[in-house]
Image (cartoon, rainbow, N blue to C red):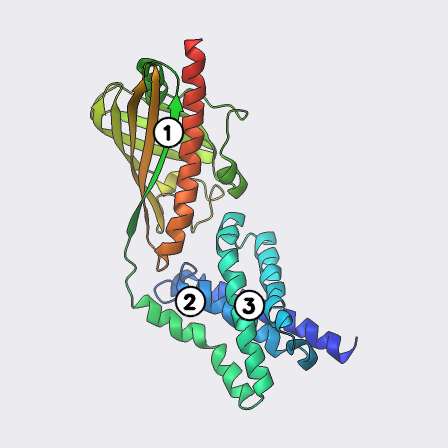
Amino acid sequence: MTQSQKALLLAVVIPTIYGLILRFLFGLDEWNEIFGIMTLTFLIVLPGIMGILTVYFSPIDSIRKTEYRVLAPWAPVFLLLIITLLFSIEGWACWLMILPIFLLMASLGGLLGGHLKLKKSEKKLSVSLVVLLPFLFGPLESLVDSQPTTFVAYTYIDIKAPADKIWNQVTKVSEISLEEDKGYLTRFLGFPRPVKAELIFEGIGAYRSAIFTNGLVFHETVTEYKENQKMSFTIKANPHEIPSTTLDSHIVIGGEFFDVLNGTYELEAISNNYYRLHLSSQFQMNTTFNFYAGWWGKLIMKDIQNNILQVEKKRAEMNVK
């Protein structure tokens, strides 16, 4: 193995090991109040430093190329992804959500690492300080209380059927077959798919259970009810009911970071036997990067809702024929 090849190997191995060490330390329950996986320090600072280390330990001829400084840091990021997935340290859903930011920050770190390497002066001191940055920013970030942010996911579908036929599908959704399930995003992420929904009685205070695969249940209590017009309900998912293998701990519904609060169905008349069925929900994110987590939350909730709506539309229209 040539000196150049050894340098390239180190450029991948060292930042990958650094990433694994940080993932282990930030995942310790004992350090939960100071460090955490669901923090900007882990999401932004860690991949940035991995990018710096990648380029810093690369051969000088390679780092003179801008495209190398931008793309080379992706190698340890993908290696970290593979290792954490193989050993079930992280879930696929979490990685899919954070990967775009990891790659971007790794590239920015690569550009900075190239600057440090090409500058040559004080490079050892600079890199030594850089690898310690998470241990500075982590405690500082922990001093900032994360404020829960509420988001709204709104969806609708147009249905050609009488109001009562549609409403029957709203109040009680019989078992959804795999062929009827069109939740492509949630299925790709490995989320539980909807199975059925049952309403004990029609009226305020009624209990409704929305049952998903793998033990996920939305416990719903009706807070507003107008037959064939509107139904609002609170939503509670109990994390202790959900098997640990169902969802990644960082995105478990009803957990520390992600919770669904309530939902509303509204049936709007467009013309004779032609209606628009609205379905909206409120959910809450509790991280220091709610702006990004909320965007993903909306995509997930809209996928779930659109999936339910298309089932209700198909069944209501079939009952007319």
Depicted 133 relative to depicted 142: above or below: below
Query: How far separated are the C-alphas under marks 2 and 3?
Result: 16 Å
> Where does the N terminus fall, quadrant-wise?
bottom right
Q: Residues within 10 Å of mark 2 (few under 14, many from 20)?
A: many
Q: What kind of element bears circle 1?
A: strand
Q: Residues within 10 Å of mark 3 (few under 14, many from 20)?
A: many
Query: How far separated are the C-alphas under marks 2 and 1?
Result: 36 Å
Query: How far separated are the C-alphas under marks 3 and 1?
Result: 43 Å
Q: Is residue 21 visible?
A: no
Q: Are marks 2 and 3 in contact (CB under 8 Å)?
A: no
Q: Nearer the viewer, mark 2 or mark 3?
A: 3
Q: What residue appears at the point 55 percent right and 86 percent down from the top-left corner?
A: 123
Q: Quadrant of residue 162?
A: top left
Residue occupying the far top of the picture? 321
Q: What kind of element bears circle 3?
A: helix
Depicted 298 relative to depicted 147: above or below: above
Q: What residue appears at the point 53 percent right and 81 percent down from the top-left corner?
A: 127
Mark 1 highlights which residue? 210
Mark 3 highlights which residue? 107
Residue 41 numbered mark, or none:
2
